[in-house]
Amino acid sequence: MTDPNSHTSAALRARFAAALGEGGRQSQWLAAFADVPREHFVPSFYRQDAEGRWYEVSEEDPGYLEAVYSDTALTTQLDAHGVPTSSSSEPGLMLAMLDALDAEPGHRLFELGLGTGYNAALASSLLGSDNVVSVDVDPSLVRRARRNLERGRYRPRVYAGDGAEGRPDRAPYDRVIATAALRRIPPALLAQARPGAVVVAPVGFGVARLVVSEHGEATGRFLPVPAYFMPRRGPARPPDFAGLETQAGRATSVRVADLLDRLKFPLSLALPGYRSCSWRDDEGEVTGVGLWTEDGSTATLHASGRARQIGPRRLWDAVEELSSVFPDGTPAREDFGLTVTPAGQRVWYGEADGRSWAL
């Protein structure tokens, strides 16, 4: 049976790929975006209404295809508490990451984080399905991605498991990409990569591009694009805001706006995996910001300039250190780099022997 939307989809895909290539951008991946139907991988998605309540948008709803072929990340799965746990990433960011691989037909690619299967299908269109291996920790997502892939002609090798362990039976890999936020580069992925392989992975709120050398070592810089991927899942303690009420706090020169903007990226590297929230008054002005890490360490900053912290990690100390390193302006992502050795992993600023933070 012919899909009545196929012609509309094809036209939208062509315009979609052309829009991604605006400004004369040259990319071998644009043909893949024009070829692979994104709606196969996002048969429905979730949006929030004005009150923050999630509602589902499916193929029958007006504007569905137009939303699918927009340069927008689409939430595709929620947990029992209404927290997003999977999404189809922003296509423009996907294109930037695929471009950064410098991949060629025939290269073998490992992908950490299968998600909907859309990125694996795009990779298969250039590299060949047999050369694309993707692993996701969520078996239900893998089953759904397989069904999505069956709607098209690409059949990458997909598995349920811990993507941080790689897939040694299909190694070695010429290229490695991660589509879930990482706190550090999994050593197993470097061990399964050939010397000279390129690794592209979200670390903090950015994307690192590394070149693998010998003996599990790699180094490179961050791309200029921001990135906010779903974190890899794991146990975590909630923030201890109640405990903070017992702390006297201290005056600080760091502003609430710094945490929300200027220091956001370097903070994501100095405190890997940190989470945050904010409070607003009736006029919508931010009155405070909270930070916490998975061990329960918690810090808050009130708009009045008073900070509190509690827990095994002194989060506010880390914030003030970053503020002293970057007292003015927003540091560019591409000025940061990442070096991985068997002894550890460190992010650096400026040059590899410059100011650095251990991951």
Image (spheres, rainbow, N blue to C red):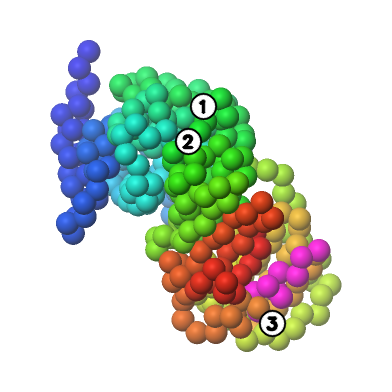
Q: Report the front residue among 250 and 212.
A: 212
Picture quadrant where residue 249 is located: bottom right
- The residue that appears at 49% across and 40% down in the rendered structure is 194
Q: Residues within 10 Å of mark 2 (few under 14, many from 20)?
A: many
Q: Give the mark, 3 or 2, whose residue is nearer the N terminus.
A: 2
Across and down, in percent, residue 34 comes to 22, 37
Residue depicted at 38% across the width and 35% down the height: 107
Marks 1 & 2, CB-CB < 8 Å contact: yes
Could you give the CA–CA distance between mark 3 and mark 1, rounded to whole angstroms? 53 Å
Q: How many marks?
A: 3
Location of the C terminus (image quadrant): bottom right
Residue on which disc 1 sits: 170
Q: Give the vertical position of 82 relative to 284 (above or below).
A: above
First to last magenta residue range:
312-320
Q: Residues within 10 Å of mark 3 (few under 14, many from 20)?
A: some
Q: Are marks 3 and 1 in contact (CB under 8 Å)?
A: no
Q: Amino acid at mark 3?
A: Arg
Residue 44 placement, left or right of 298: left
In the foreground, 347 or 268: 347
209 with respect to 10 (left or right)? right
Task: Mark 3 or mark 1: name the one nearer the start of the chain.
Answer: 1
Q: Label 3 to label 2, Cα distance in Å? A: 50 Å
* Residue 10 x, y percent position in the rendering: 18, 33
Residue drawn where x is 35% and y is 42% of the image: 103
Q: Position of residue 285 (x, y in %)?
A: 51, 75
Residue 306, labelled with which disc? 3
Identity, as a three-letter code, of the amino acid under mark 2:
Tyr
- The residue nearer to you, when weighing 103 against 205, is 103
- Of badges 3 and 2, the one in the foreground is 2
Residue 173: assigned label: 2
Looking at the image, which residue sits at the far right?
246
